[in-house]
Structure formats: structure tokens, C-alpha cells
Amino acid sequence: MEKALEKLAKQLCEYDEASLMALWEKYQALAEDFQPTRAWEEAVLILGMIQTVRWKNQLFNYHWSE
């Protein structure tokens, strides 16, 4: 499990925030439209990953500026 999470983290670090944010509205809309399906669960996880990259960049920039 840990190795799989590390692999996902490495992959996420390769994506730029601007490209991910272009997908924000699509996955936000899918997450808001609850469906008890695997597709809905995946959309929520994708939205979470986009948020995570954004938060990571904000945190990085905060610390870098100090």
C-alpha cells in the first residue's frame, strides 16, 4: 500500500497546477452530483488530488518566500 501511495505522489509531483486546474470544474460538478457509483468515487478522488497539488504548491510557496 505504501509503495502504491509513493508512486501516486511521485506522479502527482510531475503535473503542473495549471493543467490540473483546467479539470477542476469538470470534477467538481461530478463530485457535487452524488451517485452511489465507482465513477463518482473516482471523480471525488481526482478532485481531491487536484486540491492536494494546489495546497502543496501554496505551502511550498509560503515556505519558499520566508
Image: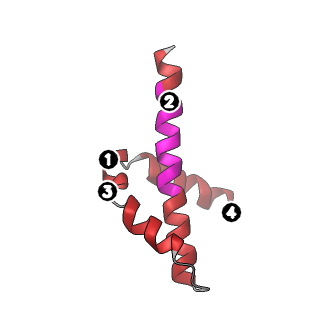
**Is 23 rendered above or below residue 21?**
below
Residue 60 is tagged as 2
Q: Which residue is mark 4?
A: 1
Name the amino acid type tagged 2.
Answer: Phe
**Quarter placement of the N terminus:** bottom right
Residue plotted at (57% across, 84% down): 35
Give the CA distance from mark 3 to mark 4: 29 Å
Q: Where is residue 27 drawn, in percent x and y?
A: 44, 67
Residue 45 is tagged as none
Name the amino acid type tagged 1.
Answer: Ala
The answer to whether the residue labelled 1 contacts the one labelled 3, judged by CB atoms less than 8 Å apart, is yes
The magenta region covers 49-61
| Neighbours of disc 4 within 10 Å: few (<14), some (14-19), many (20+) | few
**Is 28 rendered above or below residue 41?**
above
Closer to viewer: mark 3 or mark 2: 3
Closer to the chain start, of discs 3 and 4, is: 4
Give the CA distance from mark 2 to mark 4: 26 Å
Q: Which residue is mark 3?
A: 22
